[in-house]
Amino acid sequence: QVHISESGGGSVQTGGSLRLSCTASGFTFSDASMGWFRQAPGQERAWVTTVFPSGKLQYSEPVKGRFTVSRDNAKATLYLQMNNLNPDDSAMYYCAAGVRRPGWQYWGQGTQVTVSS
């Protein structure tokens, strides 16, 4: 049974930092593409970043230079270091796993990030 769980969300002021974690089980973590998505109230879920099994990284434009994604395959854990946060980053952040192409097959329940001005 697949299980994905995010943690590390919270409330910070503009310019602050947070580190999100995502622990996964039930599939071969090292073989999966792992990603972060976010969804603000009234908006569609938006892709944030992906780290592929090869280690290749991709970031959406709004977070480039501020967010850093990493993975620890031994711990089956995905991380998202978020720096220089601003109110536009406020959203529910979701971790996703892509174990076969195309798309993302498994999702966590999300962790809330709130950035105040």
Image (cartoon, helix red, strand yellow):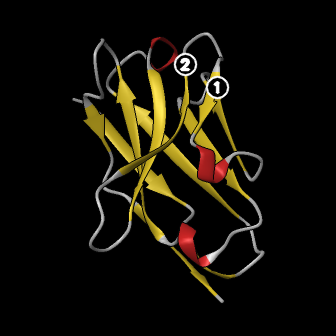
Residue 37: image location, x then y, percent:
43, 48
Regarding mark 1 in the picture, which secondary structure is present there?
Answer: strand
Tell me what residue is drawn at x 36 percent, y 23 percent.
Answer: 98
The quarter of the rendered structure image containing the C terminus is bottom right
Residue 99: image location, x then y, percent:
34, 17
Residue 98 makes an appearance in the image: yes
Tell me what residue is drawn at x 57 percent, y 63 percent.
Answer: 8
Q: Residue furthest bottom?
A: 117
Query: Along the horizontal axis of the image, is 89 left or right of 64?
Result: left
Q: Which residue is mark 2?
A: 52
Quick one: label 1, few (<14), some, or many (20+) residues within 10 Å?
some
- Please, what is the three-letter code of the amino acid marked with disc 2? Phe
Q: How far separated are the C-alphas under marks 2 and 1?
A: 7 Å
Q: Nearer the viewer, residue 88 or 93?
A: 88
Regarding mark 2 in the picture, which secondary structure is present there?
Answer: loop
Residue 21: image location, x then y, percent:
57, 49
Against 17, residue 7 (above or below) is above
Residue 112 makes an appearance in the image: no
The quarter of the rendered structure image containing the N terminus is top left
Query: Along the horizontal axis of the image, is 43 left or right of 115?
Result: left
Quick one: label 2, few (<14), some, or many (20+) residues within 10 Å?
some
Tag 2–tag 1 contact (CB < 8 Å):
yes
Figure quadrant of residue 83:
bottom right
Against 108, residue 41 (above or below) is below
Tell me what residue is drawn at x 66 percent, y 74 percent.
Answer: 86
Residue 57 marker: 1
- Please, what is the three-letter code of the amino acid marked with disc 1? Leu
Q: Nearer the viewer, residue 71 or 13?
A: 13
Tell me what residue is drawn at x 62 percent, y 22 percent.
Answer: 74
Residue 30: image location, x then y, percent:
52, 15
